[in-house]
Amino acid sequence: MPALLISPSVIGTAQSLSGQSDQKPPQTSEKPQPKKVEQYRVTKLTQGSGLQQLGPVAPDGKSMLLIGKRPDKAPNLYAMDLASRRMGRPLTNFNLGVADPQWSPKGDLIALSGFDDSSDFSELYCYDLGSGELRRLTHNRFADKEPVFMPDSKRLLYTTDESPLPDAAFGILHVASIPVAGGKGEYFTDDETSSIEPGISPDQGGVLLVKIDEESGRHSLWEYGKDGKARRNLSGRHFARIHRYMVDPGGGCIVIWGQEQVEQQEDIYLLNLKSGEITALPEPDLPKLRPAVSPDGKLIAFVGAAAHGSQLFLFDMTTGEIQQLTFKGSRVTTPVFVSQNEIFFGSDREGGPEAENEIYAIDLSARLSDKEKEKEEKDKENKEKKEKKK
């Protein structure tokens, strides 16, 4: 509250008023809290998609992978054309579902892990967009998952619980590689501790992976050479858990979704590759998960806890500020930047908490007018009144 400037004559007058000293300070009205109204235009793109997860955008930016579940069907792989905003036919027909789809660097192949009746565990597959052929790459009684293409597209790295060590303890995971054209898999790591989540280093010359300490269970992000030899520990012992990481397109940092302690809530961190400094995003009391990085590396969209379930948030690296983008519904999942100004995300925002997720797009270049915001606020108030009556 700004200071009140009072002249000496006024002070003297007040002191001469028969000793009255119980005068109340001037009343000031508190500023009303800003209304929580969405600022950008949100468009519903699908109906009945059975969305399970949004996947990566193709290298040419023309399509996006996603996992959807049709009625009485297992989750399977689809592609959405980003020009028409339409889902095509399912690319796979697994009886027990798919996971972990990844594009090849040229965008002509898709690697994924799939589940069918012939195996009790997930196996690796490669889908050829040109021929429509789905080829199975691994044939074993072990779980093979999290595939990623090497930069030359000739081999896949993946996580497996098949160990190269004859006396390895049950549950030890390793990173392995296999030719995309087919052939026998080879072990990339042969440590006595688990290694998971392979990825490609920012300079394309090495491999990233997460190692799990055998005694403490803490996670650390490592850089390896393509020869399978460890180069350096990038994150030290900072993290109890690393759920996911992604390289900033600018190459200067790695975005990590993790936890510093097992009992702590999930957060998002920036690992500076030059200095090695690890910095958490602001607002430590806000749980943050499932980050997505914009093409220029300056924005991070993520799912955060809100008054009603989870909502979509945005962190601006330039300003250092976090903004809540959505306020409707009770569930937001897997945001993905499809361009610098547009984010796709899954949500139940129009169907209620019992509804399935559908795909929505938010346009950061299309701010709502004041009249549109007023309508949004009235619709929100009417909905809240109806829910209270129930």
Image (tube, helix red, strand yellow):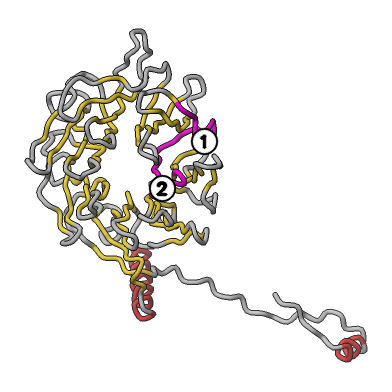
Q: Is residue 219 above or below residue 51?
A: above
The C terminus lies in which quarter of the figure?
bottom left
The residue pinned by badge 1 equals 263
Residue range in magenta is 231-254
The residue at the point 32 percent across, 69 percent down is 41
Side of 260 where 300 appears, left or right = left
Count of numbered circles on the image = 2
The kind of residue on which mark 2 rests is: Asp
Q: Is residue 137 a member of the stretch shown in magenta?
A: no
Q: Pinpoint residue 63: horizontal percent, then vertical percent.
A: 20, 53
Q: Quadrant of residue 205?
A: top left
Indicate which disc residue 248 carries.
Answer: 2
Q: Is residue 51 above or below residue 327?
A: above
Q: Is residue 252 a member of the stretch shown in magenta?
A: yes
Mark 1 vs mark 2, CA separation in Å: 28 Å
Q: Pinpoint residue 103: horizontal percent, then vertical percent.
A: 23, 42
Q: Is residue 65 above or below residue 317?
A: above
- Is label 1 or label 2 in front? 2
Instruction: Name the foreground residue: 377 vs 218.
Output: 218
Q: Quadrant of residue 39?
A: bottom left
The kind of residue on which mark 1 rests is: Glu
The residue at the point 39 percent across, 25 percent down is 195
